[in-house]
């Protein structure tokens, strides 16, 4: 049930939103840029120390994890209601802000549930627990994806009308009550916690982090890209912009420390200690492990951003997408996730991780083939089924791997850091996928996303020989 609560909002930020925006007449390149709302998931490690170290005064009788969880679930509902009220045709910027809020609170919920899951059982049972969590997660995605599109189709979304999508997002906000119910009937993990006695300093640091993010966004928005019509140069220039923005945000924090306006110990306790713990355990191999984490889901995520737009442009209806991609596809993903959990317990994490990376990349080649054919429901079902089984298998393998890397001393912070790293580069590249397709076409695009998986396979082979996780 907690997996359901995690899975429900994510497609409302990505997949369902892309259909809404496409039907609203928003340009393809703008629609894919909305995938950058996913950076909330990529940067969630910045506020994960708050979740670990700071106790919430209200709801405190529920326990640390559950009180944080209830707060974020209520805020997700609030953000979905705000999103439903605004029409992107009238103000696309307000829609962007509302969706970013949904992503932010959804990412925070994921921090808490991941920590809850890891703290609940030992490593031997993480495979089965991860599989059932992913099953719930995919059912949540089923409801947020297929369910929302079915409702939109039923209420007449083929011809754009804002009221249709308003009702869809309001309905989805009500379904978040399932996650709240699950939280209320669950039990707090039996873990001894040492809360920080510097709560005000933690919140002050969090506010400074928010200010640094605002500085990041302001500088990024005011550096014009001179290569807008050249996709590769535009991407490279964006990397340079990001580096400049990171440096400026970091300089702001360093100035605060230098002026003694920010406590240095809070930074050490919140970020440096969890990172040091990881490096101490894995030594020089830590960098390669982090590289593997950052690349593992690249092929899957970059391809997935364009999937719904591809289906619509191939001539498939919203109801087709809802039925075959979001409904049957989710059951295929659940099946893949259960296979992944079984393989991990039977053959070990690293072998499962390799197989997951291999089949996830190969499935992208099926989309390259689909791009060359006429619209055919049987072809669509076959490709979606194969893709979702491979995605579910790879997802389960990766969750188990990350859980094994995490120290129980820094559960929320380390897992948030790993999962944030997992999403950062894929989301960055995915934001350019619309322009990428404009230049090379769908077939070449899908083939290229498959080739991205080759370095991942090489890394897994090397790491499995040096530092395997069983």
Image (cartoon, grey):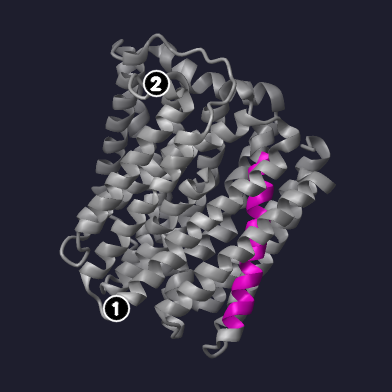
Q: Position of residue 51 (x, y in %)?
A: 44, 26
On screen, 386 above or below 356? below
Q: Decide: few, some or many residues near mark 2? Use Cα within 10 Å; few <14, some 14-19, many ≥20.
A: few
Dot 2: what SS?
Answer: helix
In front of the other: 437 or 335: 335
Dot 1: what SS?
Answer: loop
The residue that label 2 is drawn on is 60
Residue reaching furthest to the front? 185
Q: What's the magenta region?
A: 379-401
Can I make out residue 453 in this image? no
Please give the name of the residue rendered at 76% of the width and 35% of the height, measured from the top-left corner.
124
Q: Position of residue 389 (x, y in %)?
A: 66, 64
Please give the name of the residue rendered at 51% of the width and 77% of the height, measured from the top-left corner.
442
Q: Position of residue 206 (x, y in %)?
A: 34, 25
Q: Quadrant of residue 94?
A: bottom left
Residue reaching furthest to the left? 90
Between marks 1 and 2, how big is the CA–CA gap? 45 Å
Along the horizontal axis of the image, is 390 left or right of 158? right
The residue that label 1 is drawn on is 156
Pick whichever of labels 1 and 2 is earlier in the sequence. 2
Q: Position of residue 263 (x, y in %)?
A: 36, 12
Q: Quadrant of residue 406?
A: top right
Please give the name of the residue rendered at 46% of the width and 83% of the height, measured from the top-left corner.
314
């Amino acid at each position: 049930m907690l997996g359901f609560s995690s899975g429900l909002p994510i497609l409302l930020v990505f997949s369902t939103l892309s259909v809404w925006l496409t039907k609203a007449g928003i340009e393809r390149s703008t629609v894919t840029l909305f995938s950058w709302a996913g950076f909330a998931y990529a940067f969630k490690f910045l506020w994960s120390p708050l979740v670990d170290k700071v106790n919430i005064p209200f709801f405190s009788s529920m326990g640390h994890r559950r009180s944080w969880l209830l707060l974020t679930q209520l805020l997700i509902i609030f953000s979905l209601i705000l999103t439903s009220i605004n029409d992107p045709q009238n103000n696309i910027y307000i829609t962007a802000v509302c969706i970013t809020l949904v992503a932010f609170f959804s990412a925070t919920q994921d921090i808490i549930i991941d920590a809850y899951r890891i703290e609940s059982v030992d490593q031997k049972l993480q495979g089965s627990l991860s599989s059932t969590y992913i099953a719930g997660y995919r059912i949540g995605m089923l409801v947020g994806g297929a369910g929302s599109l079915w409702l939109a189709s039923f209420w007449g979304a083929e011809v754009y009308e804002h009221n249709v999508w308003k009702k869809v997002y309001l309905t989805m906000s009500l379904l978040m009550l399932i996650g709240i119910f699950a939280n209320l009937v669950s039990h707090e993990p039996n873990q001894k916690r040492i809360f920080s006695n510097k709560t005000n300093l933690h919140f002050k640091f969090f506010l400074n982090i928010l200010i640094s993010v605002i500085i990041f966004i302001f500088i990024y928005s005011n550096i014009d890209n001179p290569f807008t019509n050249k996709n590769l140069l535009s991407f490279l220039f964006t990397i340079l912009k990001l580096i400049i923005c990171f440096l400026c945000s970091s300089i702001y924090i360093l100035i605060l420390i230098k002026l003694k306006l920010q406590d240095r110990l809070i930074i050490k306790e919140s970020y440096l200690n969890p990172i040091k713990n990881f490096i101490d355990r894995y030594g020089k191999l830590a960098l390669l492990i982090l590289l593997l984490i950052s690349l593992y889901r690249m092929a899957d995520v970059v391809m997935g951003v364009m999937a719904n737009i591809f289906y619509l442009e191939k001539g498939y209806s919203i109801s087709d997408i809802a039925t075959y991609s979001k409904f049957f596809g989710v059951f295929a993903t659940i099946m893949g996730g259960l296979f992944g959990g079984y393989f991990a317990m039977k053959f070990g994490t690293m072998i499962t991780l390799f197989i997951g990376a291999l089949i996830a990349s190969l499935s992208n080649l099926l989309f390259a083939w689909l791009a060359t054919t006429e619209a055919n429901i049987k072809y669509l079902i076959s490709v979606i089924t194969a893709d979702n089984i491979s995605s579910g298998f790879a997802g389960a393998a990766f969750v188990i791997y990350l859980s094994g890397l995490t120290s129980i001393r820094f559960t929320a912070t380390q897992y948030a850091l790993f999962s944030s790293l997992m999403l950062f580069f894929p989301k960055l590249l995915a934001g350019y996928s619309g322009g990428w397709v404009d230049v090379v076409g769908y077939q070449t695009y899908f083939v290229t996303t498959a080739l991205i998986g080759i370095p991942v396979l090489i890394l897994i082979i090397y790491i499995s020989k040096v530092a395997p996780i069983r």
